Image (cartoon, rainbow, N blue to C red):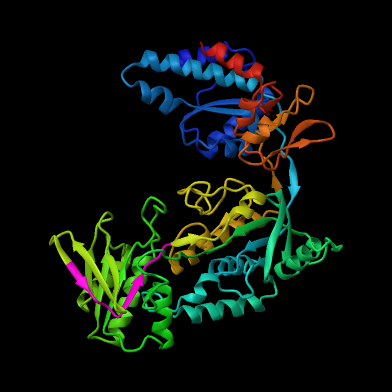
Amino acid sequence: MDMGKLAEAAKAMAGVVHVEEVPFLCTKEAVSSIGAKIRQHKANGAVLATCALFATKKLAAGIGIDPCLVQTFNLREEAAWSNKGNPEAATRKAIALTRMAVERVRLQEACPMRVMDMKQAALVIGGGLAGMVAAQSIADSGFDVHLVEKETELGGNARRIYSTVQGSDVQALLRDTIEKIENDPKIHVYKDAEVSEISGYAGNFQVAFAQQREAAKVEAEQEAGQEASPEKGSKPLLEVGAIVLATGGEGGIPTEYLYGKNERVVTQEEFEKRLFDGTLGNVKSVAMIQCVGSRDEKRPYCSRVCCSQALKNALRVKEMSPGAEVVVFCRDLMSYGFLEQYYTLARDKGVLFIRYELDKKPEVKDEGGKLKIQAVEPALRGMVTVEPDWLVLSAPIVPNDQSKLVEIMGVETTEDGFFKEAEVKFRPVDFVKDGIFVCGLGHSPRSISESIVQAQAAGERTVALLSRPQLSSGRVVSEVRERWCAGCEMCIQVCPYDARYKDEERGIVLVREALCQGCGACVVACPSGAARLRGFSDTQILSMTEVAI
């Protein structure tokens, strides 16, 4: 690449007052040098040819200039490295990139940021183990937490789990967690309550909820034609800066293998309860069938914990009755990570694992009050027959009904009905909509330890947001040319961040800058050209295109 030609091209651009080649631009000394040159030449902008890893905002702060007026482009990867062995092509591309960057800065308009106060409190929806852990994590950092639980007691799905496959006492953990929650002055618990309305944005949400019993009374009074006070059964609006959704899940109800027709056919949860409360009796044989009602066309996902539940209960049976026969019918066994050791232990204890294919599921019959299971073993290609005392079904974890929260909060769910995170690798507990986080079974099937870790992550993300005394909008946000706006609302429909709303009195659409992420979907959708992105004018973009070609 010919750096001399690049410098000459830059000097020839309108508005350029100084061009300099700086070695090792990332160093503090280089930043200080650039700042001195800007002050010396009284420049109001800077264009930097750098590498892909250069931190523009950090440099802008270091040289004391508005980040909107500092434009960088990737000289190394986009020009030099992409044209190795062809220096002329590299030079041509570098000159084009330089011209575009200079033209953009020359025509750049101011991009002010709106500053908003932060409501330094959080709302956690769901009082299961994940919700309580998230609430405790937030409260431990000194912030008030409002914990809303729709049931009359805390604990959620964990109330029906007695131990983990590793042997940990879940009920002891649950009792200890509930005691901490109910005695923490920073945590305000509302049981038998349901969120009815949420408005606002990150840093400033307004939340209304109602006690379900009182709300039911109000509805009954209204149906009877009586005058019911709209305030009755409702709580005043809460003002919070962040929301954590921990709405949980539950075990699905099997519809096959004689479940509900034979009292000896139970789910893993029901079987575990019998194991721990002593009502199981003398067990001589137990059969288990995995993937009941899951990993099929209707419910294609794996619930992750079903196999560890089976291993846990199988080992518990062997512990109580070493001579008992335990047979597990499975398509495969998902004993991932360190759980593999419990699969090996179960094999050592004499638990039999028999595989079956999806199109050849086990057949279960009730013959004179006795259970009979037949299945084709694919390896031996023979029929296996078992007559157990108990048949235990591993049903899937299904999400609780999310429809109301999806509607009032504007968040997304997956095809399977679980809440959908913004990005699985980089924002695994965030929603696309800022200020809202997710954890627990409402996000996806997971073990207790995984739910706790995810709840702690959601709590820490919440604390990171609430710790800011103020919240600033982005510099590049959408805005509306009000004279051009026809109020068609097409931009509202395409905005993924709920950042646009219609002013009914004026008949035009306006922007909630705090919610806007500058994606530009509204600009594409607007038929009249009223929508635009601040910092990207038509004149600027056309001028950049012209100098590039």
Q: Is residue 493 left or right of residue 361?
A: right
292 falls in the magenta region: no
Q: Is residue 58 left or right of residue 333?
A: right
387 falls in the magenta region: yes
- Residue 189: image quadrant is bottom right
- Residue 332: image quadrant is bottom left
Q: Position of residue 467 (x, y in %)?
A: 66, 57
Outermost residue, front direction?
A: 368
Q: Nearer the viewer, residue 411 or 321?
A: 321
Quadrant (top left, top right, bottom left, bottom right) of the N terminus: top left
Q: Position of residue 539 (x, y in %)?
A: 66, 16
State whether residue 254 is above or below residue 347: above
Q: Which residues are magenta?
A: 384-396
State whether residue 530 is above or below residue 9: below
Q: Nearer the viewer, residue 368 or 512?
A: 368
Identify which residue is drawn at 45% across, 66% down: 253
